[in-house]
Amino acid sequence: MFSSKFNHTMVTFFYIQGITDVSDLQILIFIQVLLIYLITLGGNMAILLLICLDSHLHTPVYFFLANLSIVDVSSATITLHKVLVIFITGDHMVSYPACITQMYFFASLIGHELLILSAMSYDRYVAICNPLRYHMVMNSSIGSLLAISCWFMGFIQVLPAVVIFSGFSCYTSNKINHFFCDMIPLIKIICNDTSVLDILFLFHGIFVIALPPFLFTSVSYIFIISTIMRIPSNTGKQKAFFTCSSHLTVVTLLYTTLVSQYLTPTSLGTLNAKKMISLFNTAAVPLLNPLIYSLKNKDVKLAVRRMLGFCKIIG
């Protein structure tokens, strides 16, 4: 389990506790997590397939939505698979390198999701504030460049924090009170005084990962709302606001869960409480995103009808 050297506890693998250690709840939790994961996978893959097959959705905003679906599927797979593996095989163990790798990819995907949502806010800004120049400003080349930049920045911006974290190999225990390798529960079992580390990661999370896309999204919506308020007719205002309501709902949902999970002092919540918030963030949010866009988006609903009509003709 451990190897000791100079009174330090060197961890070679971690024990993932899971969502709960109550045996009577294991089957219920397994069924719930499996259903959530399958629905998340099916919903996001349906959005991807729809965007690929329907030429009416070959626009930058839906290209960004396709990237968002890829992030949701990847994030849910990275975090929830261990819950399913634990129930099926009973294997709670994960190696130290695999744990650090999982933490890196999860953090990178969170960073990318924030960036892609900020790119989508810019798309909505152009569509509402400069509609006549939309096809000139937001063409497929610009959309692809923004998406690639978001992926690149997502994987780069979390790298310094993960490199610093990987330098710590001394832990008071190898038991992680979580269902995947996340930074907060890992910090709690580090041997050394982590007060400086807490401040460093909080600073990095706020000012490097969260704040830039938040400010960009906020500024975009300030201009969007200002433009909408100048529209003379109430019908025009409602129509303009409806075009960005799905995106605004997803942004609000994601930032609310992230703030509750990572940017609140540990004194305001236990690890078990944060674990439940994390479960909502990693399971429910990827599930809700395709539902929000499909239920509140006229173009997506029309694309579904066209696809169903095409299937009926083939059948």
Image (cartoon, grey):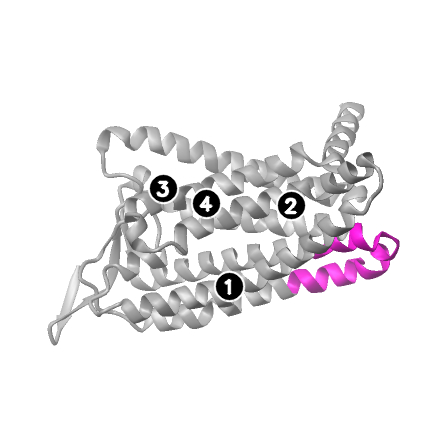
**How far is the residue under mark 4 from the one under mark 1?**
17 Å
Q: For residue 4, which quarter of the picture?
A: bottom left
Q: Identify the residue position indicated by label 3 in the image.
A: 276
Query: Residue 65 has which mark?
Result: none
- The magenta region covers 122-148
Closer to the chain start, of discs 3 and 4, is 3
Determine which residue is flagged by label 4.
Answer: 281
The residue singled out by tag 2 in the image is 247
Residue at (46% x, 51% y) in the render: 258
Q: Is residue 149 left or right of residue 91?
A: right
| Tags 2 and 1 touching, CB below 8 Å | no
145 magenta-colored: yes
Front residue (pair 312, 21): 21
Kind of element beneath mark 3:
helix
Q: Residue furthest right?
A: 132
> Where does the N terminus fall, quadrant-wise?
bottom left
Q: Residue 108: horizontal and vertical position, in percent?
A: 49, 61
Gap in angstroms between the C-alphas marked 3 and 4: 9 Å
Q: How crowded is mark 3: few (under 14 residues within 10 Å), some or many (20 or more)?
A: some
Is 241 placed left or right of 210 in the picture? right
Residue highlighted by disc 1: 209
Secondary structure type for disc 2: helix
Q: What residue type is labelled 1?
A: Ile
Looking at the picture, which amino acid does disc 2 mark? His
Label 4 residue SS: helix
Vertical placement of 152 versus 252: above or below?
Answer: below
* SS state under label 1: helix
Q: Distance between the residues labelled 3 and 2?
A: 24 Å
Q: Is the magenta stretch mostly helix, strand or loop?
A: helix
